[in-house]
Every structure is written in C-alpha cells, then in structure tokens.
Image (cartoon, rainbow, N blue to C red):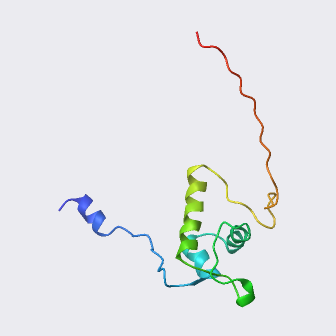
C-alpha cells in the first residue's frame, strides 16, 4: 500500500443531507457555512425553498435548501464574487445594477 491509498482511505466525505429531515435555520447555517442573515436574504429573494414559514414558529429548510446554499457558495467562489453583506454592508438586496455596453465590429482582413 502506498501513501496515496492511505489518504483515500481516510478522506473526508461531504455531508449528504437526509431528504426526510427538516433543519432549523441554525443547523442550516452550520451545515453550509452561510450566515443566518444571508440565508434569510436568499429565502426572501425566492432563491431558497423553505419547508415552514415564520408563521409556524421559525424557518426550517430541507435537503434541497442545503444543496442550493452549497451551490450559491460554489458559484461565488468560482467566479470570485464576494458574498453579500447584510446590515452594515453597502449592498442592499433591492439595489439593482444596470450594465450597458457597445459592440464594435470591424471587417476582418
């Protein structure tokens, strides 16, 4: 057995959320390393499914929400996007960004 085999025997596996379990917002934040406030922003923007709404005593999320939060984090990392700041940050959720550009075509020689 070489060193590569030893490493693969002890490799960490990503936690796979159980589809039959509902997680509190605190547990969801711990599992995904996403802050509670950001989770609420994503939920209120319709990016994140919730199993139970606050009227029923709090926010609860399922395995699909865990996967969505992981995907958001992955996309932010891959594209160098700084996660949103809530509260003291300068970006607010309702802010919109207008992008315009001009395309210039030139004839190929």
Q: Is residue 39 above or below residue 19?
A: above
From the viewer's perspective, tell me whether residue 48 is left or right of residue 15: right
Question: x%, y% of residue 17?
Answer: 48, 77
Question: x%, y% of residue 91?
Answer: 79, 57
Let me know if residue 56 appears in the view: yes
Q: Which residue shows up at 58% across the image and 70% down it?
A: 33
For this orientation, the residue located farthest to the bottom is 57
Q: Is residue 36 above or below residue 107?
A: below
Viewer-proximal residue, 20 or 93? 20
Question: x%, y% of residue 61?
Answer: 60, 79
Viewer-proximal residue, 37 or 106? 106
From the viewer's perspective, tell me whether residue 75 is left or right of residue 52: left
For this orientation, the residue located farthest to the top is 109
- Residue 90, quarter of the rendered image: bottom right
Viewer-proximal residue, 16 or 47? 47
Image quarter in which the C terminus is found = top right
Question: x%, y% of residue 71?
Answer: 55, 62
For this orientation, the residue located farthest to the left is 1
Q: Is residue 7 above or below residue 81?
A: below
Image quarter in which the N terminus is found = bottom left
Let me know if residue 57 appears in the view: no
- Residue 7, quarter of the rendered image: bottom left
Q: Which residue shows up at 24% across the image and 59% down it?
A: 3
From the viewer's perspective, tell me whether residue 10 is left or right of residue 50: left
- Residue 12, quarter of the rendered image: bottom left
Please tell me how many numbered marks the rendered image carries: 0
Q: Which residue shows up at 82% across the image and 60% down it?
A: 94
From the viewer's perspective, tell me whether residue 90 is left or right of residue 62: right
């Amino acid at each position: 057995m070489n060193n590569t085999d030893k490493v693969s025997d002890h490799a960490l596996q990503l936690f796979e959320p159980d589809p039959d379990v509902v997680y509190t917002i605190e547990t969801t934040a711990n599992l995904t390393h996403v802050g509670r406030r950001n989770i609420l922003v994503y939920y209120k923007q319709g990016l994140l499914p919730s199993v139970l709404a606050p009227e029923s005593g709090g926010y609860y999320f399922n395995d699909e929400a865990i996967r969505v939060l992981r995907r958001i984090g992955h996309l932010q990392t891959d594209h160098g996007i700084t996660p949103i700041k809530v509260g003291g940050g300068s970006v607010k959720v309702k802010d919109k960004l207008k992008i315009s550009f001009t395309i210039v075509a030139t004839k190929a020689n």
